[in-house]
Image (spheres, grey):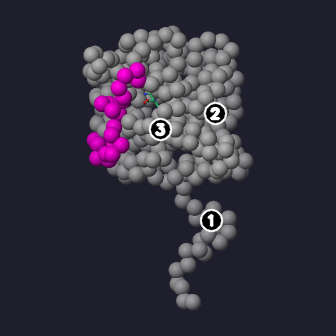
Amino acid sequence: MEIIRRPRRLRGTQAIRDLVHETDLHVSDLIYPVFVVEGENIKEEIPSMPGIYHYSLDTFKDHLKEIADSGVRSIIFFGVPDHKDDVGSGAYDMEGIVQKALRLTKSLYPDLICIADICLCEYTSHGHCGVVDHGKILNDPTLTLLSKAAVSCAKSGADIVAPSDMMDGRIGHMRRALDEAGCEDTLIMAYSIKYASAFYGPFRQAADSAPAFGDRKTYQMDWRNKKEALVEAMLDVEEGADILMVKPALAYLDIVKTISDHFNLPLCTYSVSGEYSLMKAAALNGWVDEKSIVMESMTAMKRAGAKMIITYYALDIARWLKEEQ
Ligand code: PBG
């Protein structure tokens, strides 16, 4: 047979495949989400997310050591407070659970990159990400509260604040508030493109943050749309975001690719709770090979254009990467 081009030549051996491969996943790309709760001696597995736990601050110390030893260098904090109210005041309390966890983490591991998720939904009695009036989620009054939350987390040691609420104008508002508070070095990682996704289901159980009425469709994006992803990203760039994010990841790789092609800021994608739970459940049933499925999925996110990935699998991936060396 006369075949001039034989692409299989490039796949002949593992060494050749390694020589020509295009996409890598590094431990420095990984961001690990953690859930901190009030109380003592608590390490409770989240039923919908086997392998992921709620930690009180005392047990969280041991977990921090595990994280630091794994080689993972970035964590994103979620708080589950004891007390919730109408205006989510736990989100901007200097003695709030995340603020305390940030101070503890920075005192023990100053080099660990600490990211604070900024939102009200874990702290509001109604579970919405903004202030509610007669069933409406109000945009502008929410901005002040989000900015207060960002400043309190920055003052407690957060290197990066990551607003996940999807109110309009929050990045610009927050940037000004941070600068006025003397936190001009604090980075903003904007959840710029966040769809109203069913893939957040297990997280809402973990964070006890499901909305008490209605849904999040008046602020999170409609997953039938792509053009508004470009608008959201453009606004966040103009308003001063340092890092953009697309969330969820796996079902939205076309969006990751589009944003990566159009914008020059570092891009993060969040492989959310539902993605973790789907893979974990299938793995626990012996239906898929967990490591292969996870590494293939994460590499696909990098290939689509993500520079960094928030994933509940971060510690496992760090271990698998070490084993390969
Ligand atoms: C808070 C927030 C959510 C997630 C991250 N920040 C939940 C939501 O918007 O309902 C989801 C993360 C996940 O599913 O892993 N607004």
Compared to 283, does 64 lie above or below?
above
- The residue indicated by pointer 3 is 199
Residue 11 occupies quadrant: bottom right
Tell me which secondary structure the magenta stretch mostly adopts: loop
Q: Earlier in the sequence, mark 3 or mark 2?
A: 2
Picture coordinates of residue 204, whole percent (x, y): 49, 27
Of labels 1 and 3, the one closer to you? 3
In what element is the residue under mark 1? helix
How far across and how far down the image is residue 122, in percent?
46, 20
Callout 1, which amino acid?
A: Arg
**Screen quadrant of the N terminus:** bottom right
Please tell me whether mark 3 sits on a helix, a strand or a loop. Answer: helix
Q: Which residues are magenta?
A: 211-231
Mark 1 or 3, nearer chain start: 1
Residue kind at label 3, given as amino acid type: Phe
Q: What residue did someone put label 1 on?
A: 17
Figure check: 280 above or below 93: below
| Residue for point 40% across, 28% down | 163
Question: In the rendered structure, which disc, 2 or 1, sits on the residue that comes first in sequence?
Answer: 1
The numbered disc on residue 50 is 2
Task: Give the crowd class for mark 3: few <14, some 14-19, many >=20 residues within 10 Å.
Answer: many
Quarter-wise, where is residue 31 in the image?
A: top right
Crowding near the residue tagged with mark 2, few <14, some 14–19, many ≥20 C-alpha atoms within 10 Å:
few
